[in-house]
Amino acid sequence: MSKSLDKHDPSDLAILGGDPLFTRPLAVGRPNVGNVDRFLGRVRDILDTRWLTNDGPYVQEFESRIAELAGTRYCVAMSSGTVALEIASRGLGLLEEVIMPAFTFVATAHALMWQGTRPVFCDIEPQTHHIDPGAVEALINHRTSGILAVHLWGKTCDVDGLAEIAKRHGLPLMFDACHALGVSQGGRRVGTFGACEVLSFHATKYLNTFEGGAVVTDDAELAEKLRYMRNFGFCGEDCVAHLGTNGKMNEVAAAMGLTLLEERDELVAVNKSNYEAYLREIDGACGLHVMQYPSDGAYNYQHVVAMIDEDDACLERDHVVTVLRAENVLARRYFYPGCHRMKPYSAMHEYAAVHLPVTDDIAARVIVLPTGPQLSHDDIAHIGTILRLAATAAPRIVARLRESGSAWC
């Protein structure tokens, strides 16, 4: 995949005029497709039976397998993680204000705002990047209808602290677990926390259904309601029992999910091996430090997250991202700049004055790096070399970026 595996001098850096290290871009979240023959066999069966959607056998099997993985009684598969968030929040009655972190993918906020529920943005903990329970409690008022927390980077929030606050105030607690499929911590599996948890099977997730999502829960009444809501409210052939929409997962999407479920252990093993290689090869390079996973859990290692340490960094985070992208290493600035600084929220009076100092600090320092089967350990070693060369040439790089008028400088 590499065009030139030997870069020994800063002048070899693409940002300074050299050739890019990789001929094909290395993307964060490059889709996994699994065993193509097994997938196509399932698709042929779907076409032969003509059962393309409406709770077909592949969707039912996929739901059963995901519920088993999550350790829950019920899984309700949907057409996307965003639709799953919308339907779950409405099913729980989160209809006025909901407290949530601003440091998350904007779909978490949009899923609320789209249906007229106001997200109330809350700050995060500096070490974990998760929503701060103390900050949550300070935001609760008579308009608060629930709490929506996010398991970020495939690690779990302070679920006990959040659950205690939610119980004391009589509020529903749900989790955006889109990063955390198959994760457990302290012997407890993601899927079993709160009233329900929402999963994503978007193409960028290590286990995808092209597009897709699901809600997992142990609440039979809630699961039944969500099934009505995702299918126009139908509870039978001619009976509509609830307000609903079209949020169903189709059979071909479920076929892809089942195919990748058969390879989940191998995909997680590759991600873990890459994460360990990044720890060896880049930790400390150019002021970057790889965020580590706690020892008391099982993780999917879907994200390799590094932080710029401002005390020993020779380049700003955006400079480092630009250097890597010039080499076709498409590192990302997640979740920059935070939902509170994105439209429509930043342009609305009630959001414009939101002060989230920890969120702003973390959003300015995070880098998410490519991983997955597309990468080899040699590739990761070469990325480390790029970062070390960039550190030695920092003044030249900054001057070049200013001269070129880079939007990120």
Image (cartoon, rainbow, N blue to C red):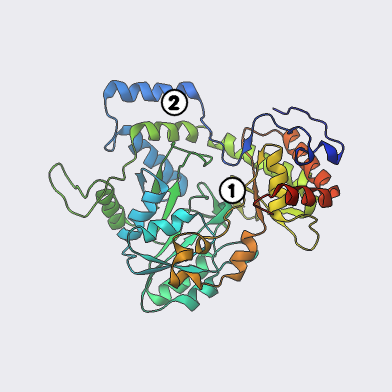
Q: Residues within 10 Å of mark 1 (few under 14, many from 20)?
A: many
Q: CA distance from mark 1 to mark 2?
A: 26 Å
Q: Earlier in the sequence, mark 1 or mark 2?
A: 2
For the residue marked with disc 2, what is the amino acid?
A: Phe
Q: Is residue 216 above or below residue 120?
A: above
**Residue visible at 42% across and 76% down in the picture:** 168
Along the viewing direction, whichever of 336 and 188 lies nearer the viewer: 336
**Residue visible at 54% across and 52% down in the picture:** 184
Position of residue 226 measured from the top left corner of the image (x, y, whole percent): 29, 52
> Mark 1 — residue?
299
Q: Quadrant of residue 7?
A: top right
Q: Is residue 270 above or below residue 224?
A: above
Q: Quadrant of the C terminus?
A: bottom right
Would residue 215 appear left or right of 19 to someone viewing this image? left
> Mark 2 — residue?
39
For the residue marked with disc 1, what is the amino acid?
A: Tyr
